[in-house]
Image: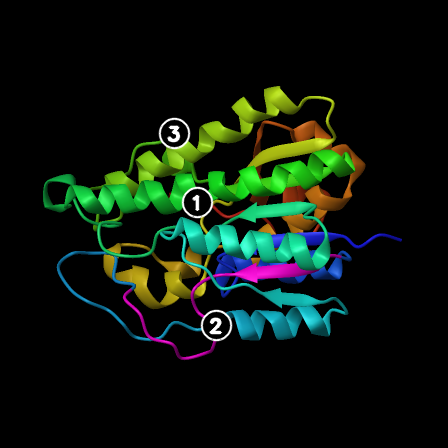
């Protein structure tokens, strides 16, 4: 039986961590990438230009790797920065060299930093560039590297974690329950990738899908986002998205979602993919 391999970005915490663990439980060895290798590392994660926040966030690649191993699969740490294409390329090349291919690519990581929750007139244009580099170009860099092995194997899943900010307007200004232009514009750009590239890959066995997570109570949502008008207690657990991505990676009928938007919370509830979760919650974003 050949090895099944998943590559997950933003795997140190939140949705990425949950995807890695659920894919491991589904039988995949998992390559993990993010910037935070060990618990307690400090780096800038403020969402606004008006103040700094370098308090360590819970989670790391090392702790996610422990959970993957506990699920009975191998974990490979390939730290990288979404703003550094060379580091991303090296990470993907390492996975391909050591494990021979990639069957599942989860583009979950995104830009974390100032400008995310700032109004347009207060946002330096270079921060908009960083949103596009991390949220759009980084997934494309990885897609270009992963696709050849998927096409050679005649199978594969590319799960792009999108957001309804790609097609809806905020209920309030950025920082007061709304979100910044860079976040929305870059998510909208990423949102177009799956449908367009899927048309080039029909009948190849490779599925590209947008995963709309809805409002998820990640560690960063709990620690950081209350100041910007978001109540983490209203969010669903990250395991909802992990369960949905694992289902897409293993269920033959998942090809029905090729090129489409997967409403993750509704699908998880309807299919009973996470019995411990009672059902969808309203999506304020």
| Residue numbers of the magenta segment | 28-44
Task: Give the crowd class for mark 3: few <14, some 14-19, many >=20 residues within 10 Å.
Answer: few
Residue found at x 62% / y 60%: 31
Q: In which quarter of the image is residue 222?
A: bottom left
User: In front of the other: label 1 or label 3?
Assistant: 1
Per the model, the C-alpha gap separating discs 3 and 2 is 34 Å
Q: Is the magenta stretch mostly helix, strand or loop?
A: loop
Callout count: 3
**Above or below: residue 57 compared with residue 182:** below
Q: Mark 3 points at which residue?
A: 167
Image quadrant in which the C terminus is located: top left
Q: Which residue lies furthest to the left in this view?
A: 121
Task: Give the crowd class for mark 1: few <14, some 14-19, many >=20 residues within 10 Å.
Answer: many
Residue 190 falls left or right of residue 230: right
User: Going from the N terminus, do you reach mark 2 or mark 1 first?
Assistant: 2
> Given contact means CB atoms under 8 Å apart, are the residues at marks 1 and 3 in contact?
no
Q: Residue furthest bottom?
A: 40
For the question of whether residue 265 can be seen, the reply is yes
**Above or below: residue 277 compared with residue 128:** below
Q: Where is residue 41 in the image (x, y as percent from the top left)?
A: 38, 76
> What is the number of the mark on residue 138?
1
Q: Position of residue 35 (x, y in %)?
A: 43, 64
> Given contact means CB atoms under 8 Å apart, are the residues at marks 2 and 1 in contact?
no
Q: In which quarter of the image is residue 209?
A: top right
Q: Name the residue under label 2.
A: 37
Residue found at x 44% / y 35%: 190
User: Going from the N terminus, do you reach mark 3 or mark 2 first?
Assistant: 2
Query: Element at badge 2?
Result: loop
Q: Is residue 166 magenta?
A: no
User: In front of the other: label 3 or label 2?
Assistant: 2
């Amino acid at each position: 039986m050949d090895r099944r391999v998943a590559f997950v970005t933003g795997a140190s915490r939140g949705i990425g961590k949950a995807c890695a663990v659920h894919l491991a439980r589904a039988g995949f060895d998992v390559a993990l990438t993010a910037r935070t290798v060990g618990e307690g590392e400090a780096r800038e994660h403020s969402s606004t230009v008006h103040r700094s926040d370098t308090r360590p966030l819970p989670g790391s690649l090392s702790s996610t790797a422990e959970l993957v191993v506990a699920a009975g699969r191998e974990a490979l740490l390939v730290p990288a920065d979404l703003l550094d294409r060379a580091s991303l390329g090296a990470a993907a090349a390492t996975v391909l060299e050591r494990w021979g291919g990639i069957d599942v690519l989860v583009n979950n990581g995104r830009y974390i930093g100032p400008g995310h929750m700032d109004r347009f007139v207060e946002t330096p244009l270079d921060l908009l560039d960083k949103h596009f580099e991390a949220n759009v170009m980084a997934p494309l860099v990885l897609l270009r590297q992963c696709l050849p092995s998927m096409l050679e194997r005649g199978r594969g899943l590319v799960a792009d974690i999108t957001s309804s900010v790609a097609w809806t307007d905020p209920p309030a200004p950025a920082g007061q329950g709304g979100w910044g232009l860079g976040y929305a514009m870059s998510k909208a750009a990423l949102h177009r990738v799956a449908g367009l590239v899927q048309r080039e890959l029909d009948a190849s066995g490779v599925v590209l899908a947008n995963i709309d997570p809805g409002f998820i109570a990640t560690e960063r949502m709990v620690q950081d986002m209350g100041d910007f008008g978001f109540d983490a207690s209203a969010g669903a657990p990250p395991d909802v998205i992990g369960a949905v991505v694992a289902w897409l990676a293993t269920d033959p009928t998942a090809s029905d979602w090729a090129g489409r938007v997967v409403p993750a919370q509704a699908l998880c509830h309807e299919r009973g993919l996470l019995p411990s979760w009672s059902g969808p919650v309203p999506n304020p974003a």
